[in-house]
Amino acid sequence: MPVIEYIDAIRQAMKEEMERDEDVFVLGEDVGLKGGVFTTTKGLQEQFGEQRVLDTPLAESAIAGVAIGAAMYGMKPIAEMQYSDFMFPATNQIISEAAKIRYRSNNDWTCPIVIRAPIGGGIFGGLYHSQCPESVFFGTPGIKIVAPYRAYDAKGLLKAAVRDPDPVIFFENKKCYKLILGDVPDEEYIVPIGKANVLREGDDITVISYSMPLHFIEQAAAELANEGISAHILDLRTLQPLDKEGILEAVRKTGKVLIIHEDNKTGGVGAEVSAIIAEELLYELDAPIMRLCGPDVPAMPINPPGEKFFLLNKEKVKEAMRQLALY
Amino acid sequence: MTQSASTGQNVRHSELGLSDEQAIDMYATMVTARKFDERMLLLQRAGKINFHVSGVGQEVAQVAAAFALDRETDYYLPYYRDYGFVLAVGMTLRDLLLSVFAKAEDPNSGGRQMPGHFGSKKLRIVTGSSPVTTQVPHAVGIALAAKMKKKELVTFVTFGEGSSNQGDFHEGCNFAGVHKLPVIFMCENNQYAISVPIHKQLSGKVADRALGYGFPGLQVDGNDALEVFRVVKEARERAIAGEGPTLIEALMYRISPHSTSDNDLAYRTKEEVDLNRAKDGIPKYKQYLIDSGIWNEEQEAELQAQIRKLLDEATAYGDNAPFPTPESTLLHVYADDAEQGGKQ
């Protein structure tokens, strides 16, 4: 099976979906000739032409709004936000429009768009090139949110997002782009939206996470195994709708749960996961629900000690996992 | 009402390509919209409905613009005062009354949205929301899609002059200008954004902004039906010829308060309203039709009686129609409702 970079998996998904369906097109800032500031769309304009790989004016609300209009007409646009930090001007279009079009028209109009936006820090991006804005959109019914951590899921989830009849936000992790390599089969496949994935079977503690921190968790779990701590790891993959059954099943396995994400703690996805567990499984737990998240500061600083302090890493994750195991 | 009846001096509508029937139909639609509006005010005052937002004073431009479009192919993104417009592109009084009473059969939203939030895929009226101007980029996106699919159509989007201050107006116009898309932007400048008068909203003209977007912008007297028809028709011809968008600023006056919850005399005088009521385009257009020899008071009385009957029927129908079931509140969040997170 070929081993490719996470960013290549995203590009392959777009390329294959555009080959499959001529209504699929990409629009955003610098996506055309330049191939994106991260090279995510490199080569696509060459293959599909300027119309289907459209360089737009620098105006995020129009990128989202124009994509929404095209989707209502019957197209399948993939709108790129250069950084998720810059998608806030498009928030009204995403929350007031895309999320509500099917509902407000009583199923008459639909809005099958994909909004791709890179999240996460660790690239010395400072406050406005590092954020994880999941919680801003999470909890808005009508949109789906996915956040893959490896190449296989990035490709399979993006293909599923393009084919989905409803709006999907695809949060890709920019730290993963070149750092994460993984097996991606040559043959066609889809990763279904709404299904969490068990990455490691274990008996002592359950760790639930998504996106980049899962790499730290997997490394930490391998090391903790040598200490006799067996970790069960669940990748949410889809943040909305959450795979409730998958979450409960993973927690039942061990009775101890740690939820980890880079987005700040208060009001984050982990809070909802925690509430679901508390509602359904409180008396089956052997320890209080634990969370390890970014601190509640506006965003991470650019100075290296500050960025390191803000971000999760293998050691922080391992320590939290050990603490829970020892509880 | 035949072609040959047109014997008067006024032949402006014929020169513009409107048959006598169409010219009369245009008038009948304006009057229908006005009568609808007046009836809604009565229903609200009688406690039958909670709320009404009015389009009185704006029907002439709305209806004339609609008649200048291709009502078989074009896409429309009206704003919340556009009762005249949607009636002209195929929505019925019954449809509007079902919306006013928020009934299950309402084609706009199944009784979910406030009245004035139009939508009908069948009629190519694109579903709208309340945060103003979000529809402008949508109009651009549909025009972009049509261009990509090589379909010959234009998108027509309206908004108030207050809305012209939103970022989505600028972002949408700019995008359409760059890609020379077949969009007609029509600002219904009714002089007020709820209570804020024009001089506190704009220090220039909306139409002049088109210069910065690289396409024509023009002002038109929104009370002059045939002039509005002409400029929209020309804008459509330009769009279809691949010459790109046009920005039209139709000047008019919001004769009614903003809504039934608004006391407009707190911020404007009765004299000002009366002065503008005298400029109302509907009686002016009626006089034109009479002067053209294709309309008379007998026909007028017939029309008024007919509209009254239709309104009575539509009101009774809307009033008696069933509400959506309470549980239907949970439907249509996603294509597959089982995916709804909040569903118990």
Image (cartoon, grey):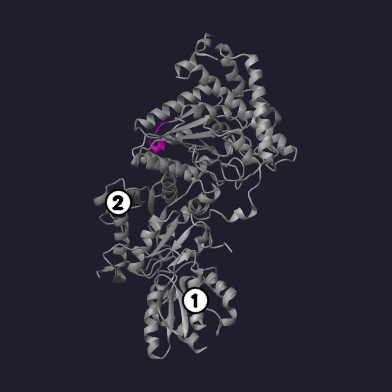
- The one nearer the camera, B303 or B316, is B316
Other residues around mark 1 within 10 Å, as few (<14) / some (14–19) / many (≥20) = few
Magenta part of the chain? B211-216
CB contact under 8 Å: marks 1 and 2: no
Tell me the residue at 39%/82% (across/down): A220
In the structure shown, which secondary structural element does the residue marked by tag 1 occupy? helix
- The one nearer the camera, A113 or B209, is A113
Other residues around mark 2 within 10 Å, as few (<14) / some (14–19) / many (≥20) = many
Q: Is residue A82 above or below residue A290?
A: above
- The one nearer the camera, B271 or B79, is B79
**Chain at tag 2:** A
Q: Give the residue number, with chain letter if any, for mark 2.
A: A32
Could you tell which of marks 1 and 2 lies nearer the N-terminus?
Answer: 2
Q: Amino acid at mark 2?
A: Gly
Q: Give the residue number, with chain letter if any, for mark 1.
A: A249
* Residue A17 visible in image: yes
Name the side, left or right, on which A165 lies relative to A2. right
Disc 1 from disc 2: Cα separation: 44 Å
Q: Please identify the residue farthest to the right as the structure is shown.
A: B46
**Could you say which quadrant of the image residue A285 lies in?**
bottom right
* Residue A294 visible in image: no
Rendered-image quadrant of the C terminus of chain B: bottom right
Q: Is residue A215 above or below residue B133?
A: below
Does residue A4 belong to the magenta stretch?
A: no
Q: Position of residue A65 (x, y in %)?
A: 45, 48
Q: Position of residue A67 (x, y in %)?
A: 41, 48
Q: Give the number of callouts.
A: 2
Q: Please identify the residue farthest to the bottom as the structure is shown.
A: A227
Q: Amino acid at mark 1?
A: Glu
